[in-house]
Amino acid sequence: MNLGDIIKNIPEEKDLSLRARPYFNHSVEMKKIFSPEERADALESVGLNVFYFPSEMITGCDLLSDSGISTMTSEQWAALHLGDEAYGSNRGYYLLMKQIRETFGHEFFNDPSSGSLNAFIFHQGRSCEDTLFSVLGKYGSDFVIPNNGHFDTTAAHIKANDMEALDLFCPELKDEHSPSHFKGNMDVLRFKELLRISHNRIPMVFLTITNNTTAGHPVSMENIKVVAELTRSYKIPLFFDACRFAENAWFIKRYEQGYEDKTIEDIVKEMFSYVDGFTISFKKDGLVNMGGGLFLKHNGLFMKKFPDMPDILVHHQIIKEGHPTYGGLSGRDIMALTVGLKIVTKEEYLTYRISQVQDFGKTMSNLGIPVLLPTGGHAVYVDVNRFFKDTGMKPDDFGGIALTAVLLAAYGHRACELGHFAFGSYDQSSQKEIVPEINYVRFGIPRLRYEKRDLDAVAEAMHVLHECRDKIPGVKVISGRGLSLRHFRARFRFKK
Ligand code: F0G
């Protein structure tokens, strides 16, 4: 018997998160070590707002976001040197065009020589949203834009342009015991009803893949197809907010029937075959520190419905970000992105990446910490209501803000409150808080940055905090309570 036949009968590892990493460290940065007292002083001096805490003082893990803090590969670092900083039509632009076509489909990036521009690069995701929605808002009034879950900046741009941002979360999301792997789906029944009553008010529809607002859960191919059929039947363009497209494709391959033998590359192509365009922040699945884009499918419904839009978008892009061939990015950034897009669809990378997130969620859950299960692709979410259930913590004590402050000061790990404070608002007339349903603290996992041991340390710190949760007081808002996107700017103080 030869060795090849023998190993056919040997099963693969039971726990994918215990597989060796598909990469090794190329270079490392030694951390500075600070004491809990030094961190507490620094955090108090910025009003307990973790966004203003100096990252150099983070001795543990910085899980504030998975966005823009990927560790780049040696190929990406090498590609930076090939960056062409020409003011027009730099070398990287053509390489990016080739890569976007290879990854998402030929129709999303016309050659600029054709005179028909449909690809717009930006320095990050929200600047694409700003451009798209500020232009779209002028095409009509009383518009509503449905989504399976708008990201906060997306909703903010829609509202800033006098349109309504509507979330259609799927019903399985609220069912803790639902075995669905696709809790990021759009609620199709509600969507059908909305189309029936209000289709004239809908200029376009969005699907966010994966659904960041619902704990990073993926969207199934089935859901994408059904939503696409519905939108097509009403001649309404469908877009992806595609920040985590590769992670979404991995979930489809792993958990959706009929896709187990397809490659990630083929699944991505199929996903994008159903949409008329997409916005993307490349700071996630572009594996880069900066970059974004807005891509319109050539001859897609959007280009047909708004034929003069590309010209208006180019104008907007030129005055806001720069010429379409660099769009607010340096030539170096574009080169790193081109390489990042080649890596991100590699199955071995995605398997490692997502099983690391799943393992972190499982470890926390096994330690009794109430996390949302199953975990999504980029983050683990702790349910703050359940965390403080038996402690008398009230909604306007903002337990999530208190928890992130204590975690950062005591153990040096930074997480992000996405709950009563970030998603709530303050009604000036009644002087009362409008409390949202969801109340989470998110642990966003940067790509290729941390190892199991680092994340185990976070889980252990959370375990200790959970055991002594009754010692964590609520916080009082000192300033910024009435602001939009207030979590980025408000200041707090502990109540007791
Ligand atoms: N859409 C989604 C789904 C996002 O998650 C983000 C950013 C954006 C758009 C905006 O992209 O940051 O490049 O302007 N999400 C980050 C996060 C910030 O922490 O979840 P951007």
Image: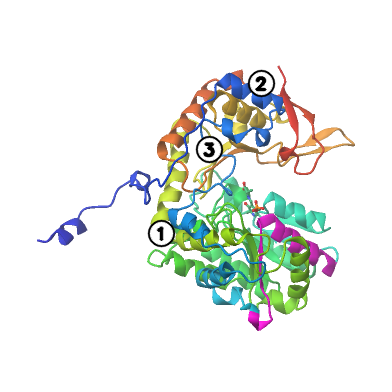
User: What amino acid type is highlighted by mark number 3?
Assistant: Val
- Give coordinates of residue 124: x percent, y percent: 65, 56
- Give coordinates of residue 86: x percent, y percent: 63, 66
Asked if residue 116 lies in the magenta stretch, the reply is yes
Disc 3 within 8 angstroms of ligand 1 (CB): no
Q: How is the image coloured?
A: rainbow
Q: Are marks 1 and 3 in contact (CB under 8 Å)?
A: no
Cα separation, mark 1 vs mark 3, equals 26 Å
In this picture, which residue range is highlighted in magenta?
113-140
Cα separation, mark 2 vs mark 1, equals 44 Å
Please give the residue where the numbered disc 1 appears in the rendered image: 347
Q: Earlier in the sequence, mark 3 or mark 2?
A: 3
Q: Earlier in the sequence, mark 1 or mark 3?
A: 1
Judged left or right of residue 28, residue 304 is right
Q: Quadrant of the C terminus?
A: top right
- Give coordinates of residue 130: x percent, y percent: 75, 58
- Mark 3 element type: loop
Q: Is residue 234 visible?
A: no
- Front residue (pair 196, 276): 276
- Mark 2 element type: loop
Please give the residue where the numbered disc 2 appears in the rendered image: 473
- Front residue (pair 412, 216): 412
- Mark 1 element type: helix
Q: Quadrant of residue 165?
A: bottom right
User: What amino acid type is highlighted by mark number 2?
Assistant: Pro
Judged left or right of residue 117, residue 63 is left
